[in-house]
Amino acid sequence: RDYERPAAPPRRRQAEPGCRLFVGNLSFETTTDDLKSYFGRWGGVDDCFLPPDRETGKPRGFGFVTFGTAADAAAAQRAADGAELDGRKLRVNEAES
């Protein structure tokens, strides 16, 4: 009997050091498009990811934004940390590997 495995989810490209930011305290209403648009003012955004809750599938209130360069990510971190988005004060840090 042939058994076909379900396709694995696509793997995220490993970001260069300093290019990926953790964004905390997001509104549950914030979308990946909102993040990309907001952080795009500081440079080219390669990827935005909002991890869903395993049980509900709803956003968990944090996400990751990956920039093309570490300089763009650093500028975004300086400007967005403590800034307000969708009524929430953001916490922005360099993401751990």
Image (cartoon, rainbow, N blue to C red):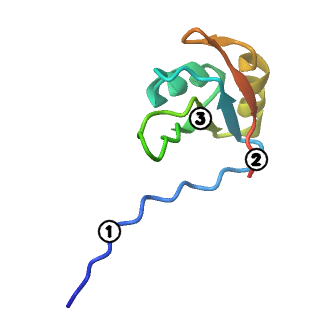
- Which quadrant of the view contains residue 35? top right
Give the structural element (helix, strand or loop) at label 1.
Answer: loop
Alpha carbons under labels 3 and 2: distance apart: 13 Å
Q: Amino acid under label 2?
A: Glu
Q: Secondary structure at mark 2?
A: loop
* Residue identified by numbered label 1: 6
Q: Which residue is mark 2?
A: 96
In the image, taking residue 57 as reference, residue 80 lies left or right, namely: right
User: Where does label 3 land, which residue?
Assistant: 63
Residue at image position (54%, 54%) is 12
Instruction: State the separation of the CA atoms marked 2 and 1.
Output: 30 Å
When asked about the image quadrant of residue 71, the answer is top right
Residue 20, given in percent of the width and then of the height, sits at 69, 41
Q: Earlier in the sequence, mark 2 or mark 1?
A: 1
Q: Crowding near pointer 2: few (<14 within 10 Å), some, many (20+)?
A: few
Residue type indicated by callout 1:
Pro
Residue 49, percent from left and from top: 53, 39
Secondary element at tag 3: strand
Decide if residue 8 is on the left or right side of residue 5: right
Q: Which residue does the image show at 73% across and 42% down from the upper left?
A: 95
